Amino acid sequence: EPITLEQTAWLAHVRRIASSQTVDPFDRQALGALALELPRILRDGPDKLIELPKRLAGCGVVLVFAEGLRGGKLDGAVTYLPDGRPVIGLTTRGDRFDGLLFTLLHECAHLALGHIRRDSVSIIDDDLTEPQHDPKEIEANDQASAWLFPGGFEIDSRSVPAIVATASRYQVHSSVVIGRIQRDSGNWKLHRNKIPKVRAHLSDAGILS
């Protein structure tokens, strides 16, 4: 679908911020290895979000957190700067820790799987909670899920003890398990109060533009 004026403006803002950032040469394999570790790195919650720009920079990727514009309806995007630096932009739409992590992994997957290259158009993801039909979007979702839940997602029940046990088994934050249950069941209110918010963490850390 054609991107909207608000999405275009947001992407231009992300690219402007990214243009001033310095990163290592892009390493697709290193990015894939880091993406697998990110859910474990963040297993205790949002406090370590401040580390992400530096970790992604080590793989050659500029990471920008930028508030979406009103009416923009987007979760994130991946693009390239003219000099060849790949950029991932993330909004705080929904203000959910699990959603931010999944979107980050989804955008990492686009890069790691070669869905976008220096001469490609930008990929803008406007709502990853909706069913996807584009093969690249489906593949990116599947890869993000595989990084979150190696070997496939399994849980015995939707009870809090089962969620805690499952999170421990996969070494992820419990909200990641809750988010997966919500998506699979379509019940977005289930245990919603147990999902940490992220906007304040990013703002306090000075990395939200």
Image (cartoon, rainbow, N blue to C red):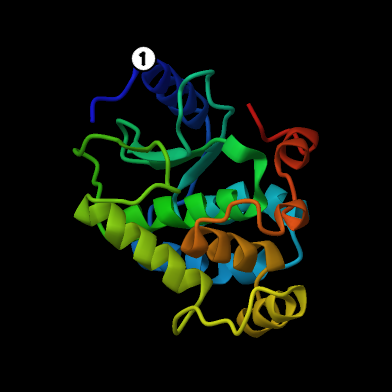
Res 33 visible: no
> Vertically, is 28 above or below 162?
above
Q: Amino acid at mark 1?
A: Leu
Residue 148 position in % (x across, y down): 52, 70
**Residue drawn at (54%, 18%) of the image:** 70
Q: Quadrant of the N terminus?
A: top left
> Vertically, is 16 above or below 197?
above
Nearer to the camera, 137 or 19: 137
**Residue drawn at (43%, 63%) of the image:** 144
Nearer to the camera, 195 or 7: 195
Residue 177 position in % (x across, y down): 61, 68
- Total labels: the figure holds 1
> Vertically, is 69 above or below 54?
above
Residue 85 position in % (x across, y down): 37, 41
**Residue drawn at (51%, 66%) of the image:** 34
The answer to whether residue 76 is left or right of residue 84 is right
The answer to whether residue 71 is left or right of residue 45 is left
Q: For mark 1, what is the residue?
A: 5
Nearer to the camera, 86 or 145: 145
**Residue drawn at (52%, 42%) of the image:** 63
> Vertically, is 5 above or below 182?
above
- Tell me the element at label 1: helix
Q: Quadrant of the C terminus?
A: top right
